[in-house]
Amino acid sequence: MTDWLDKSLQSLAAEDPPAEALAEVRSRVLDQVRPKRRAWLWYLVPAAAAASLAIWFALPRPAVTPARQPVEVAVQAPATPAPEPPRTEPSAPSEPVRRPRPARPAPIQTARIETAKTFQPRILPTGSPDFVQIESGDPNVLILWSMNSPKITDQPGENK
């Protein structure tokens, strides 16, 4: 179906395009690719420098303050006794003041601590030769100890 298109493209590829057409295409492409020259930019840089210098010299400078005469410092401060504050006796309270007692901590559950101290873990067998179950003091904790070396097997369902 597209044989005629292929043949026409091959015949066009065999012919060289005219030189004027190639020159026109090249000039259009180069006009779009070449950067535009901005000559006004080169006038802007010295103008900005001149404006910044004009602003620098136009700003008022702070006035120079005259040098102050040094102040004479006394060798020793005059010895004046410090006034003593008046003494007052504390008044006795009308009723005795009692400090609040700190709250007692909750009683420690000694039975749980004793069982934890006397508990000896047991090693229980599992259905697999690779694992051993270790019994802990808490019935909600299950410890499985792996007995095999870490290796990767190709059997499905393992080491994933």
Image (cartoon, rainbow, N blue to C red):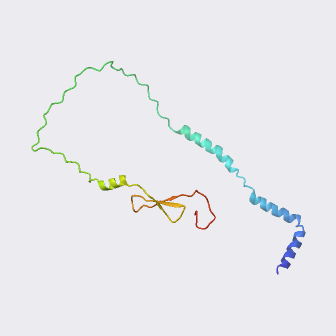
Residue in front for this viewpoint, 5 or 125? 125
At x 63%, y 44%, the residue is: 47
Which residue is outermost to the top?
75
Specify whether residue 47 is in view.
yes
Camera-side residue of 84 and 140: 140
Residue at horizontal 84 percent and vertical 77 percent from the top: 5
Residue at horizontal 65%, vertical 43%? 46
Residue at left 54%, top 61%?
130
Can you give x and y, in whole percent of width and height, for residue 89 in the image? 13, 34
Q: Position of residue 6 (x, y in %)?
A: 85, 75
The count of marks equals 0
Above or below — where is 87 with respect to 81?
A: below
Where is residue 103? Give x, y as percent.
23, 51
Q: Position of residue 120 (x, y in %)?
A: 40, 54
Give residue 79's quadrant in the image: top left
* Quadrant housing the N terminus: bottom right
Front residue of this view, candidates 96 and 6: 96
Q: Is residue 109 visible?
A: no
Q: Is residue 2 above or below residue 83?
A: below
Q: Nearer the viewer, residue 95 or 110?
A: 110
Quadrant where the C terminus is found in the figure: bottom right
Check the image and name the residue furthest to the bottom. 1
Q: Is residue 153 left or right of residue 114?
A: right
